[in-house]
Amino acid sequence: MEVQRIVQEPQHHAYLVFGYAPGDLCVEQDAGVFLLETEKGLGIDEVRELQQYAFQSDDAQDRKIVLGASNITHQAQNALLKMMEEVGGKTFFFLCLPQGTDVLGTLLSRCYIIDRDSAGSASVGQSEQFAQFIAASVKERLVLLDAIWDMGEGVRHSAILRLLQDFEQHIHQHIQRGAAEEHVSIMRCRRAVGNLRDGIYNGALHKGTLQVLAFC
């Protein structure tokens, strides 16, 4: 998925976009978009400014909140995270920040992460490792998942988030194809991905929850 299309065709409730400005996403403020770009840091006052738009009662169309700032305070991150959890499913968030910005783990766990590398491309596609994972048997997948679980905690969470993003792309592709025979498997996979994100967010991640991905 090209980074310029994520606003037009969002697959996830919230995105963290590192190394891109809102202008790079080809988005302009209109009836369905709230755009806030500031050269200063994003603080609690700016996040509160979004609330009136985010909690509009009109659900006739998707609402997209696009934010760009040089940095974001931890207080603002917590307020933004709370807003993400409370608004309806038709509101999508896009937070554009410089690479290396200090972001809370709780916010990372709730967002699809796009990171611009030094070559100027975006890591938004599925990884080569994921293709190997999908092609593997259940037994082989369990071995791969055990290896991830045995990593140090910080590295483990990053590896799991990368895997979850690959699975989300995989799910979206199957939904687009409309493969009815795979409906049960895809729904099971969506639940597993959701449970893992919840586990990372709540600090209650369990090995058994991760191992469910082997059967997707």
Image (cartoon, helix red, strand yellow):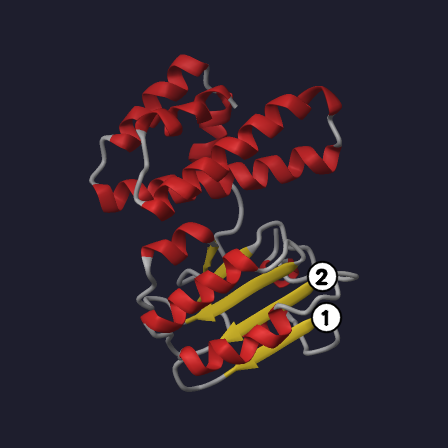
- Left or right of residue 158: residue 195: right
Q: Is residue 93 visible?
A: yes
Residue nearer the viewer, 164 or 18: 164
Residue 173 in percent (x, y) is at 65, 37
Residue 39 in percent (x, y) is at 44, 86
Res. 70 image quadrant: bottom left
Mark 2 surroundings within 10 Å by alpha-carbon count, few (fewer than 14), some (14 through 19), many (20 or more): some
Q: Residue furthest left?
A: 152
Could you tell me the amino acid type at mark 1?
A: Gly
Q: Is residue 121 visible?
A: no
Residue nearer the viewer, 172 or 34: 34
Res. 62 image quadrant: bottom right
Residue shown at the point (32%, 66%) measured from the top left: 100
Residue 198 in percent (x, y) is at 42, 42
Mark 1 surroundings within 10 Å by alpha-carbon count, few (fewer than 14), some (14 through 19), many (20 or more): some
Residue 148 in percent (x, y) is at 30, 32
Pointers 2 and 1 in contact (C-beta within 8 Å):
yes
Residue shown at the point (40%, 86%) measured from the top left: 40
Judged from the image, the secondary structure of the residue bearing numbered disc 2 is: loop
Could you tell me the amino acid type at mark 2?
A: Asp
Residue shown at the point (20%, 40%) measured from the top left: 152
Whichever of labels 2 and 1 marks the residue nearer the N terminus, that label is 1
How far is the residue under mark 2 from the one under mark 1? Answer: 6 Å
On residue 62, which mark appears? 2
Question: How many numbered marks have been drawn onto this rendered protein structure?
Answer: 2
